[in-house]
Amino acid sequence: MNVRILNRCRTKYNSRDIKMFTLIKRELIDNIALLLLAAIVPAIIITIVIKGVLEGVAYLPIGIPVIMVRILWPYLLCGAFVAAGCGAAQMNDDSQRKLSTFLSVLATTRGRIFIARTVLGVMLILIMFVPLVVTDVVLLKIFARPVPLDMNFLIRSFATILATFVCCYAIGLQVGWRSSKLMAILFGVALSAALILVVAIKGFGVESIIILVLFTVASLIWTWHKFLSLPL
Amino acid sequence: MERGVIEVRDLVKYYGGRCILDGVDFEVPTGCIYGLLGRNGAGKTTIIRILMGLETATRGRTFLLGENSRRLEPRQKSRVGYVAEAHQLIQNYKVARLVALCKGLSRRWNDKFFKQLMDTFRLPMERKVKELSGGMRAQLNLALAMAIEPEVLILDDPTLGLDTVARRQFLALAIDLIQRDGRTILFSSHILSDVERIAERIGILVAGKLVVDCSLDELKNRIKKLRVIFPQDAPTDLHMTEIIRQSNSGREMVITVANWNQQKKAMIETFKPASCDEIPMSLEEIFIECTHPEPMPDQI
Amino acid sequence: MNSQKGYVINVVFAGFMAVVVLSTVLFFGRFLCLQTLLDLMPSDMALVRKSPSGLLGDWDMWPKESVTDSNAVASPSSIVIQADDDIMANLGFLEAFDPDNRSEQLVSPDIYGFSEEYEGWRHMFYFDKALGLLVSCDIGREGLDDKGRWTGKWIKKINWYAGPRGISQKPGGIGRFGDFLVFRNVWLPYIVVFDRDTSQFVRIDFEKKEVQTGPKIEPNIVQIGRLIKNDRAMMGPILTPPQRKITKYKTRPNGKVVEYARYESILQKVSFITGTGSELVLDNSGTIYKLNLETLELEERIGALPWPGVRGSLAYEVKPISIQGSYAGLIAGGIGPDIFRPGFLVFDEDGNPIREERGDVELSRFGGGPGLWVANFVLETLHAPILQLAAYFTSLMFDGADGPRSLFILPNSLVGRKGAYCSREGLVEYILGLWVILPSLAISVLLAWRVEKDARKVGISSKAKCWWAFTTVAFGLAAYITYRLTRPQLALVTCANCGCPRRPDMERCHRCGSRWLVPELIPPLWRVIEKSRLDETRDFSPDQPNHEDSEQITKK
């Protein structure tokens, strides 16, 4: 009897996982162009960093190659706007093509549709973020002087950049449900600019990260709540 | 307490400042085929969309399979087949991909039955949905709704866009489904001859209210159209309640009455008519009588 | 989640977002005002000058007897300090371009590396956190490439490990440093470390391989040697020694006589050091001491920062002055919490203050000044009163360098500065000084009244209305924006009974309590209703009203 209940639970959760996987796969295939666009950002940045490091290493006194520090702001700006644009485009696509209208009458919930969408967003951000971090780590291992590095600055910077990407993506999702894709993207980018200004004021560090994380949570929950209740 | 498969309780819906539904109440028991009728803009699609959780009601509640429509779980949705008005499918998907998506999200999928339907409808799997004709999209929509072997079918004008043959095929399928135990169907349609063929209960929406909610036989029994010939001019002071429509022309009075009973019959007989004949009405004619406020030109 | 809880969550999160976005917008509004103010301000206003300096003794004024040329014109020495006219220098994003200048370096560097290059090798000192020791090493590359650049794998040769208890070629047995500051002068063969854990100075001489520890000291030392903070925010203090301008004449080949001037600084021996054998140290309270590098003891107090405490200054720099190798005094210049207030203090060789100058902005002296100041104040006023109240009471807790970057609590605002000032005057003045928040409060009360009026119109419950009014008084414009974003988006319908707008999602009119009538819909009076078999078995007990589906208010 217990084995039967266990099997039934396992089947229930397996079935739920399969449905989530189906939704995530759908988002992935539909938005492959966004993932490719997101991949361009780190590709360009990595090329610049590698070229800068190989051409001649100038180091800051904190032990990090100059190029790795100088590239941080352009990287943040590009990545943030791309993240916002992608979030807005995803949500707007749904609203125009009535994807959620079709999906929500099937054996799934709006919540799961939203989660699948954010899973794609997470993948998008990781594509923009992880390659550059890995590249920097590898380059530092190869080219850094054999003395302990002041990694705090880089860690703070990357943490702030990651928080900014996530926050801008969340804003893109929030403003994307509009009739015009262009307006959705522009609105997302404009609101993201306000958040990037927070980082410009506070700099890379804990204060910026806290504000961005709280903003992300607020934005995602508001969007979640709105998505669950808006007419489809 | 046994609940209906579909319950609508005091449903009110406003779009902006405009009232569409003003307190609609009805129930669809298990195994019933319910035809929901109304003129354009009466609120049929609104009720169905609220039932499916695609819209929120301004006031009131709706229940589907015992659960509030706003909190439908996947296990309830998997038991419901839904065909939306205008067949909202994902247009740029290929049919095969759409099918795979629906299959991936369903708990039960009868592949054999689905293939049978696809063969019957002769739908190409490799074409994009937007490249299909309107009728083919309707057929695809039906096939997807039926392949999950639903306990409840909710069809919002499902034969919209189907040719006569396809419509007949659909009706045949619907009847086949009806004959399986415990299936419930709620559907709305403008083709009342089809509704008359398969519906057991009828609901008619007029001015935001459900003015008719009864079985088809009961409807035909309770709404009567009579041609009454009087010895002199037809009386103008016939104070009968529940007159749907009345037109006098000399000695002739044509009157449509709701809830026809002995009392009303006696009231007419007090005027000593020369004759009082019933004009049999089809569902379509009853519908027109109920929903058209003014006499039709041929009745003047 | 029922709709009540959902609504509250919505409001909280929308409110947070509104506060952040509004604060950012207001920040840049104030930024624009202040930057324009700085641009319009005459250059002498953001600049503080004193002449003569008072530090050079007889050399301050041009010694007349040394003038042999009657065309010579003397100018005495002067001290100048100026606030940077680009307040972007105070923003955090610049740290990304110049991470060395971040303020954490004031406290305790994680790594402090020096580098001298010779024959492809670099001689380095660094702090190994894992070992807790200072390490002296040489690093270099394997070989030269065809362009003559050293390339290839890095090679590292450890020379010495240094800890509080000695120097060794091996890391063990010499103690470890925890929290410390380090100072090195390239001309000296040793480095000096202040071990904060033991409050002692330690001199590490790599040449003699010896470590000397000084006595325990009281003050909480925060910097040694170069006493500087946030130098991006200012220019100076600059000491210009006395100069003479000699007019010379030269005859050109074409016979024309040309006049030209030559400037000479008579005092070639002025240098910005404390002299041999000592260095400046700064403690937390802003007091400057002289450290004897031989005995590692703090000598007398020789100066102080112009604003109290290291945290009290937006920026500072201390310049010791020596004349021909002998310590003559120091200039401690800085910018207070207000970016428009540069100032400096001059101390003689005994630590006595001999000059004090602080700038002050006279808005009436230049066009646009008062207007911009008022605009800035208005933008400050639009901040939430509760945050302004926090600024009033907490402005002294902020580091001076953080003030220009504050988004939410503004220690540099009028309210913040008033609070800082009144806190020093006594409790009564401290409380009475709160009047400065009244304009902000007035705006909030007005907004709260508008919110209450609209809430009444859309039928929000009394409890919710109270909360909204209270929140709007506390948070001002941000709360008003939040209310507009989260208020029920309903089209109000005219009540058939009282004729006022009412909400369609309520059973009864929230004004007159009448039940719902929809006069525009005229359904027929007849009904053909047949009970289903379910209705026949049911006892028709009415369902409980579902508060999750619609907001219902009871008319009082």
Image (spheres, rainbow, N blue to C red):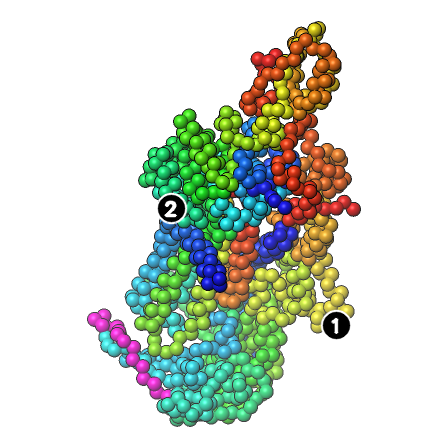
* Label 2 residue SS: helix
> Within the magenta stretch, is there residue C292?
no
Which residues make up the magenta segment?
C145-160
Q: Specify whether C93 is left or right of A39.
A: right
Residue C426: mark? 1
> Within the magenta stretch, is there residue C150?
yes
Q: Amino acid at mark 2?
A: Ala
- The chain under label 1 reads C
Location of residue C521 in the rendering, given as x and y in whole percent from the top left corner: 66, 29
- The chain under label 2 reads B
Location of residue A198 in the rendering, given as x and y in whole percent from the top left corner: 52, 59
Whether C522 is drawn above or below C168: the answer is above
| Magenta segment, prevailing SS (helix, strand or loop) | strand
Which residue sits at x=54%, y=58%? A217
Q: Is residue B3 visible?
A: yes
* Label 1 residue SS: loop
Which residue sits at x=45%, y=31%? B171
Of the pair B127 and C128, the residue shown nearer to us: B127
Q: Amino acid at mark 1?
A: Gly
Whether B29 is drawn above or below B205: the answer is below
Q: Which residue is mark 2?
A: B100
Q: Residues within 10 Å of mark 1 (few under 14, many from 20)?
A: few
Q: Residues within 10 Å of mark 2 (few under 14, many from 20)?
A: few
Location of residue B52 in the rendering, given as x and y in whole percent from the top left corner: 53, 42
Q: Are marks 2 and 1 in contact (CB under 8 Å)?
A: no
Q: Quadrant of residue B134?
A: top left
Of the pair C186 and B263, the residue shown nearer to us: B263
